[in-house]
Image (spheres, grey):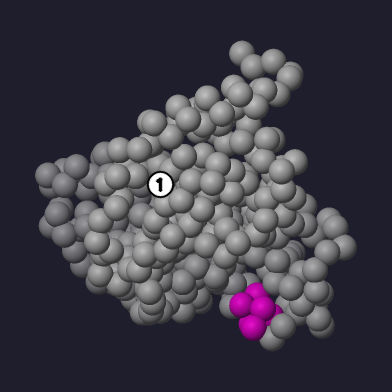
């Protein structure tokens, strides 16, 4: 158990040296030719002065469209998976731009303490997921006194990296309303599938689309229907459990993002138009977390806010339109046709 006093400099140095020894094999493996589309960048850890190299994307594309909360998608590797750089020796984590910001001598000790605590069970940097790195970056940003909106965006971007592992690549979806339209258009084809393997795959795809659109009860309905299909050798039960685990992991980060955004809104910081955008994000995250009444109240306020940008108001209108039609509770148990009732009514 740690005491209330801080580590002495010599003890901190020993801990850092030990962490360096443990992570050197991973660092050595990283010194290779850059993957296609990536370029090397050399950085120096502000805490221990260690210099290392990382690979970052050279370009991206928007072929996968976007979600209402700002999550955009590229075909291929998502650039956000590489936007946080984590030091292999101290776990100092930040966006590439934030690495340029100074860390004072007074800040280094407490920050090292925080990172040593967070990294206690980390075997190597290579074992960290992109979401892990975003959480570390948020902890670093908070320790260094960055504003709550910056911290909230780090948590939100971390949630997106988890969403990537759930939805994969679904091309050209342009926000919540478009996702709903595609769900309704696709549903009749899913109803026609009766062969267990094809039906199971289709239901998972519909759950992925529902998740991307933030249709939480439709997502639950499709996952429930998967459980009613005879096993087709796809390991559906295990996949359903993993799907649920990842949804919970994303929701945890979304909640942290919303908490940070709300804390920022409680202060008189930021331009009014930027604050309106953050209020929109609070409303949209709240919808994705399943609290539709609070989401509706927040988004209606944004839509009527004269200082909000037109793009922000348009996003609020789009999401409010979806809130009128998406299910307010799971419906599959009461549906005898074998598909979620709410989308089916629009056939």
Residue lying at 80% horizontally and 60% vertically, measured from the top left: 265
Q: Is residue 223 above or below residue 275?
A: above
How dense is the environment of label 1, judged by Cα within 10 Å: few (below 14), some, or many (20 and up)? some
Q: Nearer the viewer, residue 72 or 323?
A: 72
Within the image, what quadrant is residue 95 found in? bottom right
Q: Which residues are magenta?
A: 311-316
Q: Nearer the viewer, residue 339 or 208?
A: 208
Within the image, what quadrant is residue 168 found in? bottom left
Q: Nearer the viewer, residue 133 or 197?
A: 133
Residue lying at 82% horizontally and 83% vertically, measured from the top left: 306
Disc 1 target residue: 129
Q: How far from the left and from the top, in percent, is residue 127?
A: 36, 40
Quadrant for the C terminus in the image: bottom left
Residue 296 in sight in this render: no
Within the image, what quadrant is residue 274 found in? bottom right
Quadrant for the N terminus in the image: top right
């Amino acid at each position: 158990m740690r005491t209330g006093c801080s580590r002495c400099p010599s003890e901190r140095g020993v801990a850092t040296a030990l962490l360096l020894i443990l992570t050197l094999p991973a660092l050595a493996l990283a010194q290779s030719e850059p993957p296609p589309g990536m370029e090397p960048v050399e950085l120096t850890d502000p805490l221990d002065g260690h210099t290392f190299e990382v690979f970052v994307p050279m370009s991206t594309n928007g072929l996968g469209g976007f979600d209402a909360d700002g999550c955009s998608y590229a075909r291929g590797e998502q650039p956000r998976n590489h936007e946080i750089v984590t030091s292999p020796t101290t776990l100092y984590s930040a966006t590439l731009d934030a690495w340029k910001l100074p860390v004072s001598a007074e800040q280094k000790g407490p920050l090292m303490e925080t990172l040593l605590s967070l990294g206690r069970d980390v075997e190597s940097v290579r074992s960290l997921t992109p979401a892990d790195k975003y959480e570390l970056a948020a902890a670093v940003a908070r320790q260094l006194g960055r504003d709550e909106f910056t911290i909230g965006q780090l948590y939100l971007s971390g949630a997106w990296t988890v969403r990537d592992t759930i939805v994969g690549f679904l091309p050209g979806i342009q926000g919540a309303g478009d996702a709903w339209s595609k769900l309704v258009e696709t549903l009749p084809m899913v109803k026609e599938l009766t062969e267990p393997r094809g039906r199971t795959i289709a239901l998972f795809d519909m759950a992925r689309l529902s998740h991307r659109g933030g249709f939480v009860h439709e997502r639950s309905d499709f996952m429930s229907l998967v459980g009613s299909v005879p096993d087709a050798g796809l390991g559906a039960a295990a996949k359903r459990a993993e799907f649920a685990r990842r949804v919970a992991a994303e929701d945890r980060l979304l909640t942290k993002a919303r908490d940070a955004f709300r804390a920022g809104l409680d202060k008189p910081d930021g331009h009014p138009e930027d604050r309106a955008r953050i209020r929109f994000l609070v409303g949209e995250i709240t919808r994705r977390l399943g609290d539709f009444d609070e989401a509706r109240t927040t988004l209606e306020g944004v839509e009527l806010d004269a200082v909000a940008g037109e793009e922000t108001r348009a996003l609020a209108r789009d999401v409010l339109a979806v809130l009128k039609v998406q299910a307010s509770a799971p419906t599959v148990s009461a549906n005898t046709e074998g598909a979620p009732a709410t989308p089916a009514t629009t056939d």
